[in-house]
Amino acid sequence: MMKMPLLLVLLLIGIATLLAPDLRSASALNVRGPLLKSQTYLSPPILLLPGSVSNKYYLDIPFPRGHLALKSFNAEVVDERGAPVPLHETYLHHWVVEPYYAPAGSKEDDAAKNGSAAFPNKVVMARNSGVCTNTLGQYYGLGSETRRTATWVPDPYGIEIGLPPAGHDERWLLNVHAIDTRGAVDRLGCTECRCALYNVTVDEYGRAIGEGYTGGLRCCYDGTRCSAALARGEQELARKVFLRYTVTWQDWSPAVLPVRIYIFDVTDMALLEGKPAGTACRVEYEVEEACKDQGGACVHVLETKQVLPRGGDVVFGVAHQHSGGIAASLRGDDGRLLCESVATYGDGEEPGNEAGYIVGMSTCYPTPGSVRVRGGEALTVVSNYSSERQHTGVMGLFYILVADHVEVEQQQKPGLCFSFPVSWCLPSWVSSNL
Ligand SMILES: *[C@@H]1O[C@H](CO)[C@@H](O)[C@H](O)[C@H]1NC(C)=O
Ligand SMILES: *[C@@H]1O[C@H](CO)[C@@H](O)[C@H](O)[C@H]1NC(C)=O
Ligand SMILES: *[C@@H]1O[C@H](CO)[C@@H](O)[C@H](O)[C@H]1NC(C)=O
């Protein structure tokens, strides 16, 4: 009779040390270790020559399977030896990761695994929760800032995956847009996809590129080449790089609160122009050189409004900008700041600190419950760039994670507390399940 309670207490202490820190701190990654799983994968090889562009869609990439809560996605470009490749050699214009649903057991996407074949029909993209209707459906996506931008989803939240519709498998698509700028005549021009440097007259769909379009994705599609002056022979410089990515997750449980992913785009003027919201996401825009006219204030400000479909608590936010970007912000309809994300530039040569490139974007982790947004609220997106010189093909995206609002006190109120051997509590969801 005496043994049972003691055993139970020991068991509870064991469970508590395993789980209790989970609700207290998002930074105590090592403590939460037992719940978290992590795996590192390599993309298919990306073949590059000096000046060449690879913009391929890889289907059915290696990814964790099952009903899971995604906690982070980190990545970087590495060479065949696994060594990180700096941005001034392989510029990571962007990468995008998105789930899709394919008929269960189908092999149709095998042929497209290495980015070569056409996209199979019968595949349904899973898409995030909005806001743009035809573009920006990804779950994750970053560019040159990848190495130093947090993607961690704070506790107790997670991105819920692994619930495909009946008769379907969930698979994952990876798109990597990489530009090899070794020996480039104009490195920044190549990364900004200046049409003049790419010697193209039609875009990838064969449509003529007009005079007015000076740079952007229409000029640096898969297979194009940016002008490069080469000291050595081409074949000698051919290389294979990979996107090496690490996914961290935990098994889904009722203790995890699901988040919705929203991506705002500063180029979407639909609402301001009285069109249906989210229908005019152009993704890219241009910054004219405008320093002289503005008395030294060399800042290009682009601003728009987009409607948030469903409200809740903002639990994470980050912007995506290209070289020249300064910062971006997202505000509520009363002007309150939801998140500001500021660009960090490198000042060296080594991977993660490349001078002249955005090597990181700051992120927002509001105290749970402190930053609320309403469904239908028109949010203001602002993207600032330096206008000291012209920039083409720039972006101003804002990525946020929103969870249904739950009273924080209730959520954090421990269910069962003890004062021996030290004072400690069981999280309520554990004690309520006992
Ligand atoms: C994709 O590339 C890998 C590595 O180069 C190769 O082993 C595999 O057979 C390719 N798969 C397809 C479907 O082409
Ligand atoms: C540009 O393209 C034209 C036609 O496609 C080709 O004849 C010419 O050699 C190219 N120029 C350079 C510098 O690659
Ligand atoms: C953008 O620039 C304007 C004008 O300089 C400034 O008022 C605003 O605070 C800036 N916003 C961000 C997000 O940096």
Image: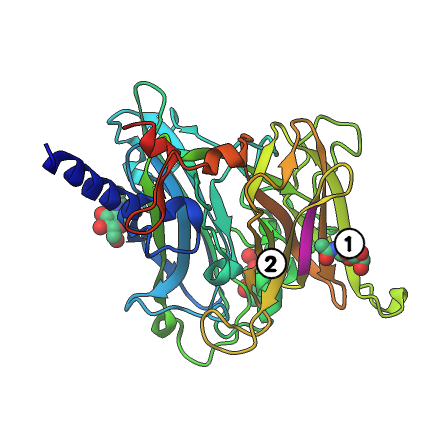
Q: Residue at x 58, y 73 (%)?
A: 185
Residue 223 drawn above or below residue 314: below
- Write down the residue under mark 1: 301
Q: Is residue 168 visible?
A: yes
Q: Is mark 1 within 8 Å of ligand 3?
A: yes
Q: Position of residue 415 (x, y in %)?
A: 38, 33
Residue 342 drawn above or below residue 124: below
Q: Quadrant of the C terminus?
A: top left
Give the quarter of the image for residue 256.
top left
Q: Residue at x 48, y 58 (%)?
A: 146
Q: Earlier in the sequence, mark 2 or mark 1?
A: 2
Q: Is mark 2 within 8 Å of ligand 2?
A: no
Q: Amino acid at mark 1?
A: Val
Q: Position of residue 23 (x, y in %)?
A: 41, 44
Q: Amino acid at mark 2?
A: Cys
User: CA separation, marks 2 and 1?
Assistant: 21 Å
Q: Main secondary structure of the magenta part?
A: strand
Tell me the crowding category of disc 2: few under 14, some 14 to 19, or many 20 or more residues within 10 angstroms, Cα based: many
* Magenta stretch encompasses residue 329: yes
Name the side, left or right, on which 248 lies relative to 306: left
The boundaries of the magenta stretch are 326-330
Residue sitting at the far bottom: 231
Name the side, left or right, on which 255 lies relative to 93: left
Residue 383 drawn above or below residue 345: above
The answer to which of 296 and 193 lies nearer the viewer is: 296
The mark found on residue 193 in the picture is: 2
* Magenta stretch encompasses residue 216: no
The answer to which of 319 and 156 lies nearer the viewer is: 156
* Numbered disc 2: secondary structure: loop
Name the side, left or right, on which 256 lies relative to 368: left
Q: Is residue 62 visible?
A: no
Q: Quadrant of the N terminus?
A: top left
